[in-house]
Amino acid sequence: FAIAYFVFPLDFDFLPIIGKLDDLLIALFLISAPGVWLFVKLCPQPIVLEHVKQLANER
């Protein structure tokens, strides 16, 4: 999604609310996604697996 945002030439800044919101959403995604990935990688594997199983059972 983030790559498409940079490749796609149309920016929605001409729309009052959506123009600023799309920039904010991309910034939040780019900040949070690596942080979540790093957090999961640094957690002990048994704990991660326990939570993954619990999430799978809730579906």
Image (tube, rainbow, N blue to C red):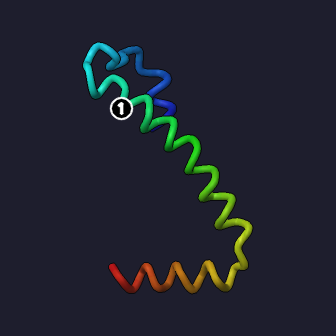
Up-down relation of residue 39 to residue 46 (above or below): above
Residue visible at 69% across and 58% down in the picture: 38
Q: Is residue 23 left or right of residue 46?
A: left
Up-down relation of residue 34 to residue 11 (above or below): below
Quarter of the image with the N terminus in it: top left
Residue visible at 42% across and 38% down in the picture: 25
Residue visible at 39% across and 86% down in the picture: 57
Quarter of the image with the C terminus in it: bottom left
Residue 39 position within the rendered picture, expressed as x and y whole percent measured from the top left: 66, 63
Up-down relation of residue 29 to residue 11 (above or below): below
Residue 45 position within the rendered picture, expressed as x and y whole percent measured from the top left: 69, 79
Residue visible at 58% across and 44% down in the picture: 31
Residue 42 position within the rendered picture, expressed as x and y whole percent measured from the top left: 74, 68
Up-down relation of residue 4 to residue 9 (above or below): below
Which of the 4 quarters of the picture holds residue 50?
bottom right
Q: Which residue is mark 1?
A: 21
